[in-house]
Image: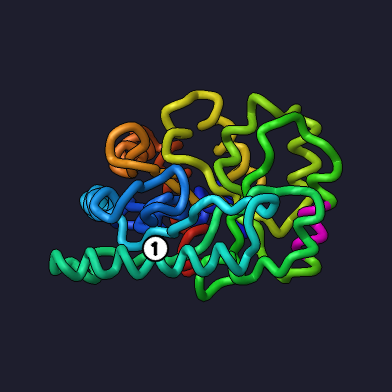
Amino acid sequence: MKNIASMEKGGKERKTLKLPVDFHTHVLPGMDDGAKNTDVSRKMLHLSNQCGIMKVAATPHYYACVESVENFIIRRKVSENALAEHMEAFGETGLIGIIPGAEVRLEKELSGKDLSPLCLKGTNLLLLELPYRSYSPWMSEEIWNIISSCGVVPVLAHIDRYLGFYKKSDFSEIFSISDFIYQTDTDAFRKKASLKFTFGLAEKGFRIVVGSDCHDTKYRPPNFDEADRLLQKNKSNRELFRYIQDCSDGLL
């Protein structure tokens, strides 16, 4: 993957700057602390659609210490069906593409499970959430084991949020794993430190995708319209925008 500097020199300018995929949502009803029912889910999808989003990754929380993969998949299917029936009742089937997956919390011995059913459907992309605590070497070891044993490509969820938990050396350990895709939140573009961090990822040539991590329509809504606006403020931001678009192309 070319870094942002090489794209500035040789890349072609896109006519449209738009991020059409939300790589991280909690839109499936009744699965976790996201959409509490199908009507909230439908309204969230409408907001995403208004922002120009064409596909959303439906990634409810998965905790291996609480639930088996098999039981989670059953619950998710029930939730998917309920939402599909609700959208059909309103004549809105096909309003937006929904790709089921999971946001998997990294735990010790997680690599001992078959995680492939939790990947975003039709891909080997696994949205992986790091623990909200100080970095420990077991985390990188477990991720290496997940990659080798499950054959997945980890997408590290909201990587920008760990700036308050990890030291520079900790990030260096994480960055040493070359197979990662880094998901930043839409909120990252309005915070100076998070935006600088995201630029740093792009300068290193790491693959970046964006997710809203939306949970509802009021307090944590899908806010891609704001992200699109912030990423077009100046030339540097637009270059980052174009870089993220190229990273996202063809993944879902």
Please state if 187 lies on the left or on the right of 93 as rendered.
Answer: right
Q: Which residue is mark 1?
A: 79
- Quadrant of the snapshot with the N terminus: bottom right
Residue 202 sits in quarter: top right
Q: Nearer the viewer, residue 220 or 32?
A: 32
Question: Mark 1: which amino acid?
Answer: Ser
Q: In the rendered structure, which segment of residues is drawn in magenta?
A: 142-147
Q: What residue do we see at 63% from left, 51% from top?
A: 63
Please state if 71 lies on the left or on the right of 233 as rendered.
Answer: right
Residue 118 sits in quarter: bottom right
Seen in the picture, residue 250 relative to 2 is either above or below; the reply is below
Q: Nearer the viewer, residue 16 or 47?
A: 47
Does 144 lie within the magenta span?
yes
Q: How many numbered circles are shown?
A: 1
Seen in the picture, residue 123 relative to 230 is either above or below; the reply is below
Percent x, y for residue 32? 47, 48
Please state if 92 lies on the left or on the right of 57 as rendered.
Answer: left
Percent x, y for residue 66? 65, 51
Q: What residue do we see at 43% from left, 34% from top?
A: 187
